[in-house]
Image: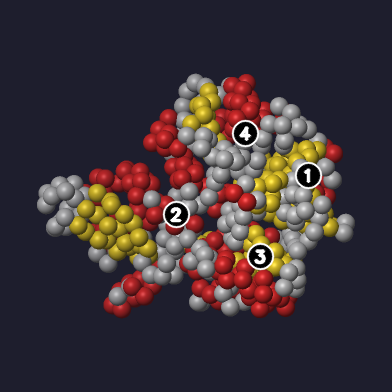
């Protein structure tokens, strides 16, 4: 079916478990192809390629690292190739020439995508071949005389299974805590980082605070804790993917980064699982009129990857709606529209491994409808943060937060909720939530930091034993 039709179709239980072959012309960030894979995952389906693979193919470094073990197979498969460059077309793990099938299958196992081109180069006519890059092939780029072969190859594609080697090591585990010294508003302030370090030591780990220059040395650690703002198109995602590929325990894991940093994924997933949210629409370029008709005014428009209230706009009338939507749709094929739901504060429930650890009320900024209010000169005003003992938070709020977090994964999440007219509504599930000393920890104290580090210690122990958590 057409990508656009797939994106606008409502999620149903009947589609769960389906395999979605994404043959779009482009997988670039926030394109139709990108959203096909993103929403397929939200619908409980299996997208090929998934978002992690799409991002991996963009990184020459990850392509090189993940293909290092294939060097002998590459040289054998391309032994009869001439020249300094060779392009290998991979159709569902196979090539027209059977002599390349083993290499195609191995590459497809590492970078699972239906249609790929592998670009190889070598320094001289007799030098060793190296995989330079991988790129997707769109359906209309397949030569007509290859169509029958491609259909045949597709039937065999899903029979393989990937296995990951367990990481084993001796001695106290090493934990890298990734921070950005130049970040104006990091998710954890310096005092909180010091508390994480002390908690890690008490849990039997060797913690080290690192910055982005530590990328090449990630393999020396047992775990990575990301404490700087995350995004798919950001070095933090590359850190998470590299760490995961090397067998480290990672928080935030790359899957959580992808899922939580896109509000369209969240909207689709929560609708499928019937989690109560404000009235929500996923809107394409020609669907702005539906917002006024189905949601009305005032309404809220959300840029899919906005954070800290950025890219979230309120429209009081049609003129404001059109202006806001035009600006956001210039950056993304789809945006999110929601009914405006005024509350004095939002609840934030912090959850790790499916367990609620802390609770806060985030009050709206003075004379504003959001927690954050932009001020002249790039400054911003914030509402009051009121920590509440997790045992004292409303059970209905905590229960919905836990349910929503489990749908996203088993990572560290900050779940935002509203209580309106006696009912609890999910607003967002955030990866990389704020844990600041003197704010989020005010009710739970140092126990919050020890709880986080206890999960790291347990997951490292399980990883060393070759078990899953």
Residue drawn at x 50%, y 69% is 32
Residue drawn at x 72%, y 78% is 293
| Residue bearing the label numbered 1 | 361
Circles 4 and 2, Cβ within 8 Å, touching? The answer is: no
Residue 193, image x, y percentages: 60, 30
Q: Residue extending furthest front?
A: 376
Q: In this view, does 201 lie to the left or right of 215?
A: right
Residue 4, image x, y percentages: 53, 75
Along the polypeptide, which appears first: circle 3 or circle 2?
Answer: 2
Determine the CA span between mark 1 and mark 2.
Answer: 35 Å
Determine the CA span between mark 3 and mark 4.
Answer: 30 Å
Residue drawn at x 61%, y 59% is 311
Along the polypeptide, which appears first: circle 1 or circle 2?
Answer: 2
Along the polypeptide, which appears first: circle 3 or circle 4?
Answer: 4
Determine the CA span between mark 4 and mark 2.
Answer: 29 Å
Residue 301 is labelled as: 3
| Residue bearing the label numbered 4 | 189
């Amino acid at each position: 079916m057409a990508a656009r039709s797939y994106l606008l179709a409502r999620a149903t239980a009947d589609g769960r478990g389906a395999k979605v072959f994404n043959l779009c012309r482009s997988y670039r960030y926030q394109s139709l192809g990108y959203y096909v894979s993103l929403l397929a995952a939200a619908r409980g389906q299996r997208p090929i390629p998934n978002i992690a693979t799409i991002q991996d193919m963009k990184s020459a470094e990850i392509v090189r690292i993940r293909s290092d073990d294939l060097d002998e197979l590459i040289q054998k498969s391309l032994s009869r190739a001439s020249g300094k460059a060779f392009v290998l077309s991979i159709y569902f793990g196979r090539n027209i020439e059977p002599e390349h099938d083993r290499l195609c299958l191995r590459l497809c196992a590492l970078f699972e995508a239906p249609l790929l081109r592998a670009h190889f180069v070598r320094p001289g006519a007799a030098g060793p071949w190296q995989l330079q890059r991988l790129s997707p092939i769109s359906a209309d780029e397949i030569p007509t005389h290859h169509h029958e072969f491609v259909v045949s190859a597709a039937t065999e594609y899903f029979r393989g299974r990937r296995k990951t080697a367990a990481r084993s090591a001796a001695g106290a585990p090493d934990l890298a805590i990734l921070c950005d010294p130049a970040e104006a508003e990091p998710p954890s302030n310096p005092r909180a980082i010091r508390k994480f370090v002390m908690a890690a030591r008490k849990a039997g780990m060797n913690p080290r605070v690192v910055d982005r220059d530590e990328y090449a040395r990630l393999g020396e650690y047992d775990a990575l804790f990301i404490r700087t703002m995350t995004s798919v198109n950001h070095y933090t995602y590359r850190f998470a993917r590299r760490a995961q590929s090397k067998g480290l325990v990672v928080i935030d894991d790359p899957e959580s980064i992808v899922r939580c940093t896109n509000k369209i994924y969240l909207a689709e997933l929560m609708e499928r699982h019937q989690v109560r949210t404000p009235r929500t629409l996923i809107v394409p370029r020609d669907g702005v009129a539906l917002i006024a008709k189905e949601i009305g005014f005032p309404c809220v428009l959300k840029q899919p990857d906005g954070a800290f209230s950025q890219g979230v706009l309120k429209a009081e009338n049609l003129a404001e709606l059109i202006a806001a939507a035009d600006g956001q749709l210039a950056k993304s094929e789809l945006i999110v529209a929601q009914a405006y739901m005024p509350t004095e504060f939002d609840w934030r429930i912090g959850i790790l491994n499916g367990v609620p650890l802390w609770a806060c009320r985030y009050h709206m900024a003075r004379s504003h409808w959001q927690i954050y209010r932009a001020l002249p000169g790039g400054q911003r005003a914030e509402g009051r943060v009121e920590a509440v003992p997790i045992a004292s938070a409303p059970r209905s709020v905590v229960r919905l937060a836990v349910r929503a977090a489990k749908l996203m994964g088993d990572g560290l999440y900050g779940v935002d909720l509203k209580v309106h007219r006696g009912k609890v509504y999910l607003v967002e599930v955030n990866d990389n939530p704020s844990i600041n000393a003197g704010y989020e920890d005010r009710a739970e104290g140092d126990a919050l930091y020890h709880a986080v580090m206890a999960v790291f210690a347990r997951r490292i122990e399980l990883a060393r034993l070759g078990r899953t958590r």
